[in-house]
Image: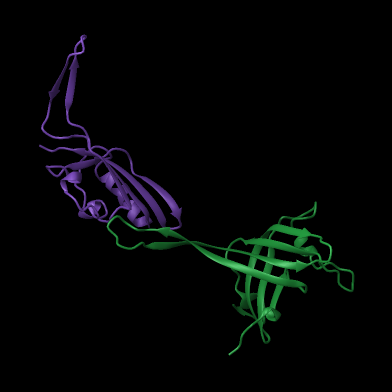
Amino acid sequence: MSLPDITPTSRSLNFGVWPIKIFRSNNGAELRRLYGNRRTNLELELVYENVSDNVANQFREKYDDVKGEFDTFRLPGNTYAGWTSDGQTFTGPTANVWRYKEPPSITSVKRGVSTVRVVLVSAFIQ
Amino acid sequence: MTYFTGRNGKLVVDGATIAKVTSWSMNADLDLLETTALNDANKSFVANLPTYTGSATILYYKDAAGAFETSGIFGRLLRRSASLATATLRLQIMDGNTAREVVLDAFITSISIGSSVGEIVSADINFQATGDLADPAAQNPIGAAL
């Protein structure tokens, strides 16, 4: 079971953070230590407006398939459709895998039509 | 070829023809839901739900028998005992003996009436349909779709 390979109607990305720890002394001197070689915790919000209920249900099925926020998965190609610059912006240098950050929300718009909002957080597999 | 004019128009409220109607109009609107995705070059939509609204202008008129034919409409909003129920409106354009019509159950949402020197008293009404349009042919032997 994979996510539906459809293009979202809106997509927003939080670039995540570099794993930096800051040590600050009482006199204001500051030391920053880098604990990794890649950004982590990218956050991707996808909205699929006015899709059929059957498509909307696939997001719920996927959520159950990966046991909620437990397992990771890769996103289908159309998730990034419409982005014309560097593909690594969304996938990261190592083609991030993703996991649900929270359960997908489904809003019924009319009979048979729903809007789905999905929030994902990146994960890194060694 | 046949054209139709205001002479062919009729308004029937709850089965009673309103004789002194100077105009009626109706709007049928369809809400659309946008389905345009990020990679699309053109906007796309799916149909949501239709709504029907309209208006009419009626002369305030007492017939020879002393009856006010506007009472059926005014009774739905202007009276203290107003029922606030829907009225069955038939907006007709007569085509010979055939009534080309739209039949709808509608709330009378506004009535505007005034009196001016040198003018006949008339009322402007607005209505909002609820539910689907009715089938003209099923309710009226001479009814047909507009």
* Image coords of residue A50 (percent x, y): 39, 55
- Identify which residue, B113 or B52, lies in the foreground: B113
* Image coords of residue B111 (percent x, y): 73, 58
* Image coords of residue B119 (percent x, y): 81, 66
**Tag count in the figure?**
0
Q: As drawn, which residue projects farthest toward the top?
A: A26
Q: As drawn, which residue projects farthest toward the front?
A: B118
- Identify which residue, A42 or A63, lies in the foreground: A42
* Image coords of residue B37 (percent x, y): 32, 56
Does residue A1 show up?
A: no
Q: As drawn, which residue projects farthest toward the right?
A: B65
Identified at 84% across, 63% down, the residue is: B117
Q: Colour of chain B?
A: green
In the displayed structure, B27 sits above or below A41; it is below
The image quadrant where one finds the C terminus of chain A is top left
Residue A118 placement, left or right of A84: right
Residue B35 placement, left or right of B3: left
Q: Colour of chain A?
A: purple
Specify how the rendered protein is coloured: by chain
In the displayed structure, A13 sits above or below B80; it is above
Identified at 24% across, 43% down, the residue is: A66
Residue B57 placement, left or right of A5: right
Does residue B5 show up?
A: yes
Identified at 65% across, 79% down, the residue is: B93
Which image quarter: residue B75?
A: bottom right
In the displayed structure, A55 sits above or below A32; it is below
